């Protein structure tokens, strides 16, 4: 059962008390107070945004529902699929909106369905309402360019090519989940797309892609394939997928992904190896999920999700700071010394990121 | 007059994150094909794209692709680096032509 953590201190305790607790309380009180203060700031931000919205659009009230950019209730995706008509510039054509019947264009309908599956995963499991957690409409652009071998998030929408060396990118649910998560990351921590923070950004997208696929298929951690891009590689590709979260470095014949910090790749290519070193946090999550058993999106997934949206996750996070934060989150969700908390430390130890539990504990109480 | 030339395109990044390359030499093409391809090599546009990419905000956008193009002739060697966002209408035909030669 997923646990979405909200500090019990939020909205009950006056801010000055929270401030005092954050400064002088014990470790647990400080964590709770910091969480509550962050939530309080978030709520005040939403209220100020609501006030701005009222001034612009004459809206009344300051509830979150009134801030949603669509009329649809939370829990309902708002999808719009556009056809780029094999161009890379210009205005794409709207070809399917929410509730429209299938178009019989494979890319359009795959994008529509995949975005819906991804939205429902985040809503059903984490009660997250779209990319911005505020009902942001999901825009997908298909038939981008001629034989374009890629998919990407451009800050506002997900863009998919028809592929040349690869198959049509929309064929793969993990590709769609991966791209949508880039939007989520941008709206949460804003992890910089460079070096270790970039590899974490990539890893979180692989995590989301795999979680959405496993959820759709009803797979447990030990039965899932943990492959990324298996549905878009054809017979000419020298491997079974682009990446293997369970066994980084083995997905194809020249797969450069390391599974351990001992093999960390220092390079200026690929924005500092963001698609390469992501194998390390990928393997850490896989190890955690298999250790805990059952559905990966439950306990292991809840820890990762609450970490990726944690206010202490900085844009320039390192593997080590991310790992320490997962420990803090696991302690908060499941308790210090819990099976889940121990498994998190074990998983990061296994990939050489956190070698010492004492070191992690020191950080958690610092 | 088309000079003898070799074009080397390297592409990296993208969702796949797999670097790929293509090499096209005029010696492997017929005279007309070589002339048509050489006509697509717009050094000003390539230099402009390189400059625009260097000036663009970094780090890059997630899963965007970047290119390195090396143009070799008896006159010398030119190297250009640019992101996919800098590939405008002038460079699009050249990039698409060379991408057809990309292989794993």
Image (cartoon, coloured by chain):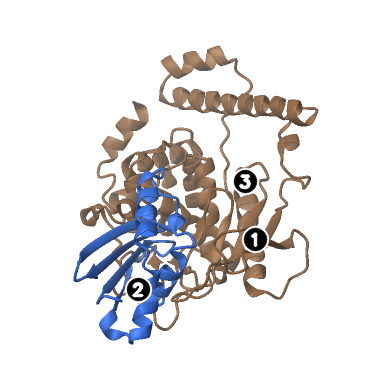
Residue A92 numbered mark, or none? 1
Name the one closer to the observer, A342 or A309: A309
Circle 2 residues within 10 Å: few <14, some 14–19, many ≥20: some
- Asked if badge 1 and badge 3 are on a common chain, one would say yes
- The x and y percentages for residue A335 are 46, 37
Q: Residue at x 57, y 62 (%)?
A: A215
* Residue B46 picture quarter: bottom left
Q: CA distance from mark 2 to mark 3?
A: 52 Å
Q: Chain drawn brown, letter? A: A
How many badges with numbers are in the image?
3
Residue A212 in which image quadrant: bottom right
Q: Who is closer to the viewer here, A297 or A140?
A: A140
> SS of the residue at dot 2?
helix
Mark found first going from the N terminus, 1 or 3? 1
Question: A10 left or right of A63?
Answer: left
Position above or below: B3 against A283: below
Q: Which chain is blue?
A: B
| Residue B91 picture location, percent across and down | 43, 64
Mark identifier at residue A128: 3
Write down the residue under mark 2.
B38
Q: Nearer the viewer, residue A319 or A104?
A: A104
Circle 1 SS class: loop
Label 1 – label 3 distance at C-alpha: 28 Å
- Position of A347 relative to A168 (above/below): above
Identify the residue at the far front of this view: B1
The residue drawn where x is 69% and y is 62% is: A93
Quadrant (top left, top right, bottom left, bottom right) of the N terminus of chain B = bottom left
Classify mark 3: residues with Cα within 10 Å, few (<14), some (14-19) or many (20+): some
Q: Residue at 39% across / 40% down in the picture?
A: A327
Q: Residues within 10 Å of mark 1 (few under 14, many from 20)?
A: some
């Amino acid at each position: 059962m997923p646990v979405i953590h909200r500090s019990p201190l939020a909205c009950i305790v006056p801010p000055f008390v929270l401030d005092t607790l954050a400064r002088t309380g014990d470790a647990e009180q400080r964590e709770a107070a910091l969480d509550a203060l962050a939530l309080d700031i978030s709520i005040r931000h939403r209220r100020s945004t609501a006030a701005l919205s009222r001034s612009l659009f004459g809206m009344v009230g300051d509830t979150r529902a009134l801030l949603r950019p669509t009329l649809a209730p939370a829990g309902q995706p708002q999808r719009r699929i556009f056809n780029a008509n094999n161009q890379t510039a210009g205005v794409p054509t709207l070809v399917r909106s929410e509730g429209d019947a299938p178009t019989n264009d494979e890319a359009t309908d795959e994008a529509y369905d995949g975005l819906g599956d991804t939205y429902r995963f985040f809503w059903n499991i984490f009660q997250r309402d779209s990319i911005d957690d505020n009902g942001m409409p999901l825009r997908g652009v298909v038939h981008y360019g001629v034989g374009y071998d890629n998919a990407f998030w451009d800050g506002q929408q997900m863009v998919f090519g028809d592929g040349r060396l690869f198959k049509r990118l929309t064929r793969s649910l993990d590709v769609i989940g991966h791209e949508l998560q880039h939007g989520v990351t941008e709206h949460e921590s804003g992890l910089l797309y460079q070096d270790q923070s970039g590899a974490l950004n990539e890893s979180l997208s692989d995590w989301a892609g795999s979680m959405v696929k496993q959820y759709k298929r009803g797979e447990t951690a030990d039965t899932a394939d943990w492959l990324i891009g298996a549905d878009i590689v054809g017979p000419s590709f020298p491997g079974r997928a682009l990446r293997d979260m369970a066994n980084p470095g083995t997905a194809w014949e020249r797969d450069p992904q390391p599974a351990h910090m001992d093999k960390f790749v220092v390079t200026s290519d690929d924005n500092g190896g963001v698609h390469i070193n992501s194998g390390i946090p990928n393997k850490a999550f896989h190890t955690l999920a298999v250790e805990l058993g059952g559905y990966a999106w439950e306990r292991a997934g809840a820890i990762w999700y609450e970490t990726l949206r944690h206010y202490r996750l900085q844009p320039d996070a390192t593997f080590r700071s991310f790992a320490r934060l997962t420990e803090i989150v696991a302690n908060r969700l499941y308790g210090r010394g819990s099976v889940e908390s121990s498994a998190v430390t074990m998983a990061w130890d296994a990939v050489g990121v956190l070698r010492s539990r004492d070191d992690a504990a020191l950080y958690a109480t610092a | 007059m088309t000079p003898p030339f070799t074009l080397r395109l390297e592409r990296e990044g993208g969702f796949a994150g797999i670097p790929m390359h293509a090499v096209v030499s005029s010696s492997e093409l017929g005279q007309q094909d070589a002339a048509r391809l050489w006509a697509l090599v717009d050094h000003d546009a390539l230099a402009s794209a390189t400059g625009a990419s260097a000036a663009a905000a970094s780090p890059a956008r997630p899963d965007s692709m970047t290119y390195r193009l090396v143009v070799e002739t008896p006159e010398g060697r030119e190297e250009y680096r640019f992101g996919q966002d800098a590939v405008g209408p002038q460079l699009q035909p050249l990039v698409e032509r060379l991408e057809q030669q990309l292989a794993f």
